[in-house]
Image: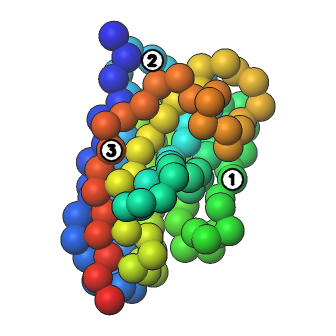
């Protein structure tokens, strides 16, 4: 059984940092594209960052580029999202997801077939 479990969310002030973790069991993340998505209240879920299974190619949405970093620790089967200089507009539930197709990494949600339950990040001004 595949499980993705996120942690590390919380309530912080603008300008603070958080590191989200996503521990994966039942799959080997070095063979999957991994993605972080978020959903703010009243909004659709959007991609935040992705990291490819081959070569670790990364993608960041324009709204987080330069502030967030996605990386993996394959020996821990864990993917991280380091979030710096947080802004109130970063407030959302953050989800990690795995794309097992072994195709080039994508931002398309439909390609991600395994999802975590999400962790809440709240940034106060």
Nearest to N terminus: mark 1 or mark 3: 1
- Secondary structure state at the residue bearing disc 2: loop
* Contact flag, marks 2 and 1 (Cβ < 8 Å): no
Q: Mark 3 sits on what residue?
A: 118
Whole-number angstrom distance, CA of label 2 to CA of label 1: 22 Å
Residue 52 visible = yes
Percent of width and height locating residue 26: 38, 15
- The residue sitting at the top extreme is 1
Which is nearer the N-term, disc 2 or disc 3?
2
Tell me the residue at 29%/82% (across/down): 124
Kindly identify which numbered label has been placed on residue 27: 2
Disc 1 versus disc 3: nearer the observer: 3
Q: Image quadrant of residue 1?
A: top left
Horizontally, is 84 left or right of 53 in the view?
left
Q: Residue at x 67, y 18 (%)?
A: 101
Element on which disc 1 rests: strand
Most distant residue in the bottom direction: 125
Identify which residue, 111 or 75, lies in the foreground: 111
Q: Quadrant of the C terminus?
A: bottom left
Where is 64 relative to 99, above or below? below
Q: Residues within 10 Å of mark 2 (few under 14, many from 20)?
A: some
Residue 117 falls left or right of residue 89: left
> Mark 1 and 3 residues: CB-CB less than 8 Å, in contact?
no
Secondary structure of the residue carrying tag 3 is: loop
Q: CA distance from mark 2 to mark 3?
A: 18 Å
Q: Residue at x 62, y 43 (%)?
A: 51
């Amino acid at each position: 059984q595949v499980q993705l479990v996120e942690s590390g969310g919380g309530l912080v002030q603008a300008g603070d940092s958080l590191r989200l973790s996503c521990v994966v069991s039942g799959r080997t993340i070095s063979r999957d594209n991994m993605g972080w998505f978020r959903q703010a209240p009243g909004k659709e879920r959007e991609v935040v960052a992705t990291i490819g299974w081959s070569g670790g190619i990364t993608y960041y949405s324009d709204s987080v580029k330069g502030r967030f970093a996605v990386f993996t620790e394959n020996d821990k089967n864990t993917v991280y999202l380091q979030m710096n200089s947080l802004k109130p507009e970063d407030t959302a539930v953050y989800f990690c997801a795995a794309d097992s197709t072994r195709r080039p990494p994508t931002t398309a949600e439909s390609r991600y077939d395994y999802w975590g339950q999400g962790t809440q990040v709240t940034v106060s001004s």
